[in-house]
Amino acid sequence: DVKVTQSSRYLVKRTGEKVFLECVQDMDHENMFWYRQDPGLGLRLIYFSYDVKMKEKGDIPEGYSVSREKKERFSLILESASTNQTSMYLCASSSGQGRDYGYTFGSGTRLTVV
Amino acid sequence: SQQGEEDPQALSIQEGENATMNCSYKTSINNLQWYRQNSGRGLVHLILIRSNEREKHSGRLRVTLDTSKKSSSLLITASRAADTASYFCATATYPGGGFKTIFGAGTRLFVKA
């Protein structure tokens, strides 16, 4: 069964902390994505990557960075966590250039910044 | 700005009834996808319909696409309590050689046993 695994289901961090959210996929997918999901706002794209060591900004990259050193792993980094980054974070992957392929999502990480 | 917008925002039906959710979008697309999300979990891909297709079926799911009206509908027949979830449409476009998938805010479906 193909999988996207996010390292934590729930996370509580303090304001100003550096936070790492890890995502690993076992499907050999080229594309990986980080979204955040907030009530009433749907899913908003933070960063994505089409290949190893490649990254592109999404719609809301401010306050975030990413790392993709290996094909299967895509990390989201909150350089200095703030309370407005409290959210559900979803990682996804897809095959090829995304043409006519759906996304496989992880179970999500609910991050609370206090 | 959101590309896909679902309607209604919330829907409550009895088990056994059909549930219909709609999605409207603004620009030309390459494909449209529907996803399900159970409370507090990740999204699960249900079905993808290409821009040159008009209808697609998968089990109890039926998706239609009307590109002239820029709209799609998801029909769940003979609904079950286990269908209770949020349903999202996502539109895929390919601006400038890349691709972009934009998700709507979702329809919350509640199926009463």
Image: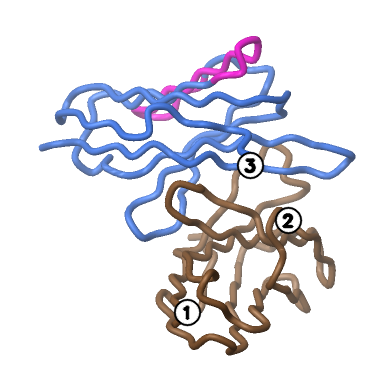
User: Vertical placement of B73 versus A49: above or below?
Assistant: above
Quadrant location, the C terminus of chain B: top left
- Residue nearer the viewer, A84 or A5: A84
Q: Position of residue A53 (x, y in %)?
A: 84, 72
Place of residue B67 in the rendered image (x, y in percent of width and height, measured from the top left): 64, 15
Magenta segment main secondary structure: strand
Question: Where is mark 3, residue-wise?
Answer: B102
Pick the quarter of the image with the N terminus of chain B. Answer: top right
Measured as percent of width and height from the top left, residue A3 is found at 52, 63
Dot 2 falls on which chain? A
* Residues packed near mark 2 inside 10 Å, few (<14), some (14 to 19) or many (20 plus): some
3 and 1 marks on the same chain: no
Q: Residues within 10 Å of mark 3 (few under 14, many from 20)?
A: many
Q: Tag 3: residue type?
A: Ile
Residue B68 placement (x, y as % from top left): 65, 10
Mark nearer the viewer, 2 or 1: 1
| Circle 2 residue | A58
- Amino acid type at circle 2 is Gly
Residue at left 15%, top 29%?
Answer: B14
Whether labels 2 and 1 share one chain: yes
Callout 2 touching callout 3 (CB < 8 Å): no
Q: Which residues are magenta?
A: B56-71
Give neighbour class at mark 1: few <14, some 14-19, many 20+ (Cα, 10 Å): some
- Give the mark toward the camera: 3 or 1: 1
Chain letter for the brown colouring in the rendering: A
Q: Residue furthest top?
A: B68
Alpha carbon separation for disc pair 3 and 1: 26 Å
Q: Amino acid at mark 1?
A: Val
Instruction: Tell me the residue that label 1 is attached to.
Output: A113
Q: Secondary structure at mark 1?
A: strand
Q: In the rendered structure, the residue with mark 1 lies on which chain?
A: A
